[in-house]
Amino acid sequence: MVGKEDLKLLGLEVSPFVIRVRMALGIKGVSYEYVEEDLPFNKSDLLLASNPVHKKVPVLIHNGKPVCESLVIVQYVDELFAGPPILPADPYERATARFWAAFVDDKLVPAWIGILKAKTEDERAEKATETLAAIGLVEATLADGRAFFGGDSIGYLDIVLGSCLFWFEALRMMHGVEIIDSGRTPVLAAWAERFGESAESKGVVPGADEAVKYANKLAAAAAAAAAAATK
Ligand SMILES: N[C@@H](CCC(=O)N[C@@H](CS)C(=O)NCC(=O)O)C(=O)O
């Protein structure tokens, strides 16, 4: 364990973005203080001061200096600490991993969050179609026999996409949408199993039931706010 650095992570247990950072710190064998935020309703002063632009977790505070945005933080952790590499060493492979990580966050994540937030069944079906189209493209990038996007071990893109898997399971439980399934996306289905069994994900990725609970809490709060607004 590397213990000399002062590292504090502001997080939320069910946030895929926070899980990415926890996995990266775990891969590097770094110890850190974890602070759970009460989101989205009671942001701490420390969170507001550390991430005044987005006011979101994760924030990694390193020797008093905040670093925000999960993809940026994972790269920072990889550059800062020795230990197993997270991004590929080869520049072309690094560029490709970053390209697909951006694709996950720009296309796939908004689509699956859209399934959760949809106000009508038509909207939900539209977001599900978008999600399946995006995941199909990711499936094709892993169809070359590698165990993980990172090769033989978990790397950058594995962390980025793998952090969303328990929410995919929650979406299956809540709305019957199968984002990854062995018929349509067999390569990702096998990868997801390996990811779930990996030491890197154990103890950091919660069960899908936690995601369901959080989604229900947000939905109840939204319903209460809507009811209050019509009074
Ligand atoms: N692009 C950001 C997304 C972070 C994010 O959406 N965090 C959520 C928790 S999952 C949050 O802090 N939400 C609080 C809010 O929206 O007010 C990242 O990659 O770090």
Image: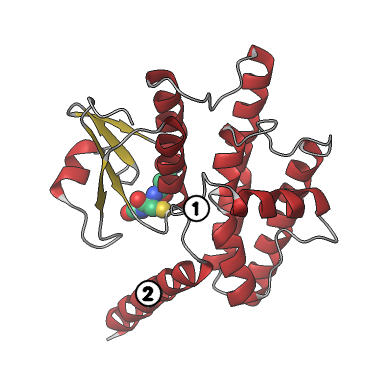
Q: Position of residue 17 (x, y in %)?
A: 44, 46
In this picture, residue 37 sits left or right of residue 137: left
**Residue 106, picture quadrant:** top right
**Image point 84% across, 58% down: which residue?**
184
Residue wearing tag 2: 217
Count of numbered badges drawn on the protein: 2
Q: Quadrant of the N terminus?
A: top left
Considering the numbered disc 2 on the image, is that residue within a helix, a strand or a loop? Answer: helix
Q: Residue placed farthest to the left in the image?
A: 45
Residue at the image position 40 percent from the left and 27 percent from the top: 77
Q: What mark, if any, has residue 64 been given in the picture?
A: none
Tell me: is circle 2 under 8 Å from ligand 1: no
Q: Residue at x 74, y 56 (%)?
A: 132
> In terms of depth relative to the viewer, which is nearer, 130 or 209?
209
Residue 10 appears left or right of 89: left
Whether residue 182 is visible: yes
Give the left or right position of residue 134, taking residue 117 as reference.
right
Residue 135 position (above or below residue 69): below
> Which residue, given by chain and number where applicable, does mark 1 sit on?
202
> What's the residue type where badge 1 is placed?
Lys
Q: Secondary structure at mark 1?
A: loop
Rounded to the nearest angstrom, the CA distance separating label 1 from label 2 is: 25 Å
State whether residue 182 is above or below residue 135: below
Residue 22 horizontal/vertical position (percent) = 40, 43
Residue drawn at point x = 40 percent, y = 46 percent: 18
